[in-house]
Amino acid sequence: MVLIESVVPDSPCGSLDIQGGDKLISINGREISDVLDYRFFLCEKKLRLLIEKASGTRREFKIRKGEYDDIGLCFETYLMDRQMHCANKCIFCFIDQLPKGMRKSLYFKDDDSRMSFLFGNYVTLTNMTDRDVDRIIEMHISPVNISVHTMNPELRVKMMKNKRAGEVLSYIKRFADAGIKLNTQLVLCPGINDGKELEYSLKELGKMYPAVQSIAAVPVGLTCHRKDLYPLEAYTPEQAKAVIDIIEDFNIHFMWYNGERIAYPADEFYLKAGIDIPDADYYGDFAQLENGVGLWASLKDEFLRALEDDLLIEELSGSVPFDSNISVSLATGEAAFNLLQELVDELRKKWHNLNIIIYKIKNDFFGESITVAGLLTGRDMIAQLSGRELCGRLLIPSVSLKRDGDVMLDDTGLDELSRALKVPVIPVPNDGETLLRSILDI
């Protein structure tokens, strides 16, 4: 059963004798324990709700509704339950590398399969039971995003320091056999789960195609706050190239038999190796953008397509003529600097009077090995941009903000950043046309 916090007045339940403080026991005879149960059984058009009143008496209410209509019950949390804490102690855990003094929520290690369903989070499966697996299969929740890291059970136990880490790999096969689509990721650590181990993991995951629809290989992120943690080293250019070569060899053979590519190195591997990032066609439907796979290619493709779209350019130039004087600054991480410079150079071929300055922000907060835009902090921006020419507006990557807010990792808000730098600060998503419009101030 789950506690009802409130009821929306003008809703199907709002007209019934259901109130905040009552408990939802079941829907159509199926017990409700959390959001997965609720969302799944709510899809039926005829509902019988068993409600326990605050007095302890139980009543049944009947509702007719559209398949996807809500019924107006509100709960204390979106999970209708406590969020599950990660039970692993991974040797590469990024949260263990955070400095002290950040907001409490950043230190919470999520490993909740329901978050995969709701927000696309990746889960390790070590918190799951056979019953959880059966429920996902019954509800056919798809896709499920899984942090695999290695398909070697013994190595997985060593890397994740959880005795269940190896045995729960069997859940991947159960999902695949049930037709559940799977996106998988491998956080690679030099000399540990790359090389021959990477080859093995790719081969084993490839056997479960087409259920396994993507495999992302991501380099371990190492901050400067690793005191007393497992000794790990960052990838060298040679090691990064070796990872790319292994994945490309796998893809060549896989595409020969299946006609499709499913394994992708993160953009960071190409940047570290000094190899050009593939074009957008390489990444198919960009299933692993959240893992930094294809971000460059996606942004570049969208931006250049927008510049080649005659109708769009006619619309934009109607608002901002080609001879307009445009002044704007952009701030990004070291990894994306060259790409933004390339895109701005293309933009200058149409709008000639551009005064655009791109600032490369060094990550002093987490350490120089962290170069991605998503881990930029406000204090680094303030320290490195104060007193610099900012051209009236400053565009920053929206991935450096919380998913549902306007605060950066170090709790610097957009208002605070704007006051410190004395310019409007505008977050821009990883979308080519939006970036173009933001530069032109449209």
Image (cartoon, rainbow, N blue to C red):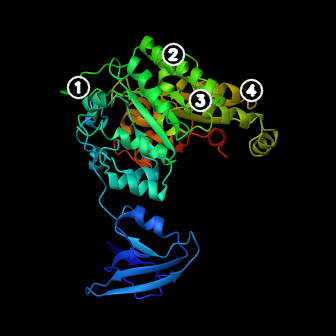
Residue bearing mark 2 = 245
Q: Please, which residue is most extreme toward the top here?
A: 238
Mark positioned earlier in the residue sequence (2 or 3): 2
Q: Nearer the viewer's eye, disc 4 or disc 1?
A: 1
Q: Please, which residue is most extreme toward the front here?
A: 177
Whether residues under marks 3 and 1 lie with C-beta atoms below 8 angstroms apart, the answer is: no
Q: Height in image: 58 above or below 32?
A: below
Task: Specify the amino acid type for callout 3.
Answer: Arg
> Visible in this render: residue 404?
no
Mark positioned earlier in the residue sequence (4 or 1): 1
Q: Secondary structure at mark 1?
A: loop
Q: Separation of disc 4 and disc 1 at Cα?
A: 50 Å
Task: Specify the amino acid type for callout 4.
Answer: Lys
Residue bearing mark 1 = 230
Q: Secondary structure at mark 3?
A: loop
Q: Position of residue 122 (x, y in %)?
A: 41, 43
Mark positioned earlier in the residue sequence (2 or 1): 1
Q: Position of residue 156 (x, y in %)?
A: 30, 31
Residue bearing mark 3 = 261
Q: Position of residue 379 (x, y in %)?
A: 36, 36
Q: Separation of disc 2 and disc 3 at Cα?
A: 14 Å
Mark positioned earlier in the residue sequence (3 or 1): 1
Q: Separation of disc 2 and disc 4 at Cα?
A: 36 Å
Left-right relation of 137 to 328? left
Q: Height in image: 105 above or below 294?
A: below
Mark positioned earlier in the residue sequence (2 or 4): 2
Left-right relation of 251 to 144? right
Mark positioned earlier in the residue sequence (4 or 3): 3
Q: Nearer the viewer's eye, disc 2 or disc 1?
A: 2
**Who's the residue at 46% across and 65% down the image?**
39
**Who's the residue at 38% across and 75% down the image?**
26
Residue bearing mark 4 = 349
